Image: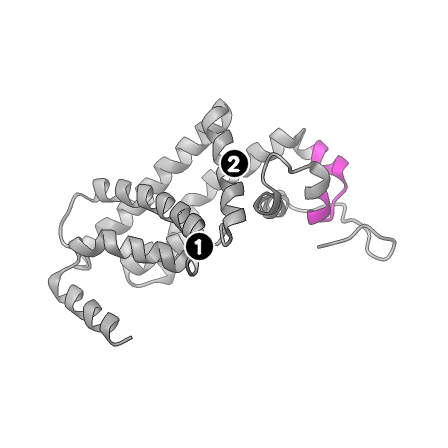
Amino acid sequence: MVYNSPMCPRRRTLPDAQVLEATIRVISRVGPSRLTLADVADEAGLAPATLVQRFGSKRGLLLAVAGQSCGTVDQCFARVRAAHRSPLAALFATFDEMTSFCQTPEAMANSLAFLEIDLTDPDFHRLAMRNSHETLRGYRALLDEAVTAGELVPCDTARLARALAAMSGGSMLSWAILRQGKVAAWLRYDIETLLGPWRPQKQKRLRGRATRNR
């Protein structure tokens, strides 16, 4: 964090993307309702007036965060796909990225508080819906590739993508309540359970042996 002191003055310029990243960190700690422009300014090392000039208001800043989320969904899927030879490995990597924003039950609660805004404010809902459609397309594309690669048996990938989206949110909420282990491992276990019936028999046997040998 950059502190406002004579020895460490606030930066006059900072790319919007970094300001929004700072905003997400603050949201994770305090939630959107308790967030203030002063909090974000302190996190980003900017003057509050600079945020007002760029985003107009707290609502404008939160809308910018929601808009950035939509704009990075396709980039996220492209990045993880390029980093993994296996389509299913790439799929699991997307869920690992998802959990990186909710490492604690408190962060999960603050994420749900943002979801409340998504569901009640038309402007936020429009962005949330776009985000969801893009995410479903990303899941389906990876599932289609997994079928082609023989990692999954032929199946209705659109339907399975929808189940993945539903299970991932419910799984993370369940973890926040039960608080057993790490959220990433909890979610991975549930996703493995969902995908299990669609694994080729040979892969099921190999995974079963690996589990017994742990």
Which three-letter amino acid code belongs to the residue tagged 2?
Phe
Q: Residue furthest right?
A: 6
**Crowd around label 1: few <14 · some 14–19 · many ≥20 (10 Å):** some
Decide if residue 192 is on the left or right side of residue 77: left
Task: Label the magenta part by its dominant secondary structure.
Answer: helix
Q: Are marks 1 and 2 in contact (CB under 8 Å)?
A: no
Decide if residue 43 is on the left or right side of residue 169: right
For label 1, the residue is 179
Q: Which quadrant of the structure image shows residue 55? A: top right
Q: Residue at x 38, y 60 (%)?
A: 185
Decide if residue 33 is on the left or right side of residue 198: right
For label 2, the residue is 114
Q: How many marks?
A: 2
Give the camera-side residue of 214 and 13: 214
Residue 22 higher or lower than 96, as above or below: above
Q: Residue furthest bottom?
A: 213
Which quarter of the rendering shows the C terminus?
bottom left
Mark closest to the chain's N terminus, 1 or 2: 2
Q: Which quadrant of the structure image shows residue 37? A: top right
Q: Residue at x 22, y 49 (%)?
A: 144
Decide if residue 6 is on the left or right side of residue 37: right
**CA–CA distance in space, label 1 to label 2:** 21 Å
**Magenta extent:** 41-53
Which quarter of the rendering shows the N terminus?
bottom right
Residue 167 higher or lower than 188, as above or below: above
Which three-letter amino acid code belongs to the residue tagged 1?
Arg
**Crowd around label 2: few <14 · some 14–19 · many ≥20 (10 Å):** some
